[in-house]
Image: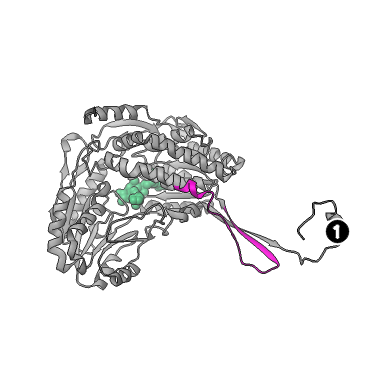
Amino acid sequence: MSLSAKDLAMDALDLVKTAPRQAFIGGRFVDAASGASLPSYNPATGELIAEVADCGEVDVDAAVASARAAFEDGRWSRLSPAERKSAMLRFADLIESHAQDLVDIESIDAGKPVVDGAESDVPHVVEVIRYYAEMIDKVFGKVAPTGAESLALVVKQPVGVVGAVLPWNFPIALVGQKVGPALAAGNSVVIKPPEQAPLSTLYFARLAAEAGIPDGVINVVPGRGEVAGRALGLHPDVDAITFTGSTPVGQAFLRYASESNMKKIVLECGGKSPQIVLGDAGRDLAAVAEQLAVAGFWNAGQNCTCGSRILVHESLHDELVATLAAVAAEWQVGDPRDQSTAIGAIIEEAALHRILGHIEDAVADGATVVHGGKRLFEESGGWFVEPTILDNVRPGTRFWREEVFGPVVGITTFRTDDEAIALANDTEYGLLATLFTHDIDRAIRVSRAVRAGVIAINGYSEGDLTTPFGGLKMSGFGGQDGGVEALEQYTETKTIWLTLGSGEPQPGAAAATSNEEPSDA
Ligand SMILES: NC(=O)C1=CN([C@@H]2O[C@H](COP(=O)(O)OP(=O)(O)OC[C@H]3O[C@@H](n4cnc5c(N)ncnc54)[C@H](O)[C@@H]3O)[C@@H](O)[C@H]2O)C=CC1
Ligand code: BAL
């Protein structure tokens, strides 16, 4: 017998009530030193679901000290590759066996549809931890091609203590994305989860302890960005920060690093991704529209790679607008706990009003609403908005420039490929661009000319585990998450240079070696 949606919701609420909500430091759940807490709300109902530790500098200091001690005594950093790998594989197995709990927590704490959690976010964490676990005993350093009189080893070592400051739009998926490679490289981590949705990260920490990840290797300090996040950024004993979130906060981390210890900063910031539909893409416009909608509406558009700027060749405009509107009508907005929901709740009330404000401003700037545009289910107390299509969006307007972080796409036309490239590049961001064409020459030419860290051709994609992900320009430093590249972000490169002797016997060498084992020489 299957449970009704109501029973499922009750089970999930019980789970949330018993899920950890204290900080996790040195292998123990503890209150913030001040005793303070922060509220976390269910975006689908507006109800308070948990009071979570509000960590301050003292707690961050304790977490960093615990991570440092774990790193220095080698309980993780100096485990053999086989031991570290098997611990991470055990951890991944445990996450997999608790996948439903994480899906439930994420749906109630972050408003994420259970379908997305079950099919995408949570499996991603399992896969990413397995992927980097498997890399531990396969990626190694180099011997440089020096002259005959020297030998140079180029080795990669863990950086030490890594702070991970993370956003609310993919809370658990990003913990995996950032912490997986950092742990595999042998580091200890201190995670600052988002204040809006901290519960899945704390649950992750509990599973880490159960899986036997040694105490102090993973620490979690929930709290406010300007307090706990800032303290991590400025901490003199943190060796690297990995951050995903808004560009202004990414810039703050660069300042923190320069004002403290020049710690390494890994940034994955905002985007204003163009989706370019070239004139030859018309033969399967229905398939194009499906992908445009995924790029624009997935995760309620609360995505750094959200394809909010659709650039379409003028010859395809009318048919594309009609096709896309029909596709948008199929994206069901609703209770994140409902299996048929494709667009769940917006993370917080302020974000809902900001999205609606973007739509209003776009209309004031000359755009027309083709589909959607309104708040839904206000009576539920939750924060929902319709998938929205705006036509005639003008370059340079607020909608064109700023991240909306909602399920809203805007359409602009062009006449030539060069005009499309110029429009695509007319943004301070450079994260992802999607391109639709059947002409391979044009695909390559446009891909080379558009400045973005990822170019997805004929289908929206951020790539997979094997490919580096990250943006250029104000989106970050490119390719820092994913693939082998991510593991390297959490290592430092060291050259060990050995000056070799001439091979001639040195005075006293015979006597010195006479009691040794015979050598090859
Ligand atoms: N990957 C991305 O591109 C993301 C972009 N955003 C953008 O940012 C907007 C605001 O969302 P937020 O969650 O507020 O993102 P945010 O960038 O403010 O927060 C991300 C993380 O940084 C922390 N943080 C905030 N201020 C900080 C500070 N001064 N020092 C240190 N840490 C700090 C937060 O507590 C959170 O853990 C969104 O509407 C969206 O436009 C948000 C989330 C992800
Ligand atoms: N979609 C990758 C991570 C992010 O949106 O923040």
Quadrant of the image occupied by residue 108 = top left
* Scheme of colours in the image: one colour
Q: Is residue 177 above or below residue 145?
A: above
Q: Quadrant of residue 514?
A: bottom right
Q: Which residues are magenta?
A: 131-156
Instruction: List x then y, in percent, for residue 253.
Output: 44, 51
Viewer-closest of 55 and 144: 144
Q: Is residue 103 found inside the magenta-colored segment of the image?
A: no
Quarter of the image with the C terminus is bottom right
Estimate how packed mark 1 is, as few (under 14), some (14 to 19) or many (20 or more) residues with alpha carbons within 10 Å: few
Q: Does any portion of residue 363 appear in the rendered image?
A: no
Rendered residue at 22%/67% (across/down): 278
Residue 141 % position (x, y): 57, 57
Residue 489 at what x, y percent from top left?
Answer: 49, 54
Vertical position of residue 282 compared to residue 328: above or below: below
Q: Which residue is mark 1?
A: 510
In the depicted structure, whether residue 173 falls above or below residue 497? above
What amino acid type is highlighted by mark number 1?
Answer: Ala
The one nearer the camera, 382 or 440, is 440
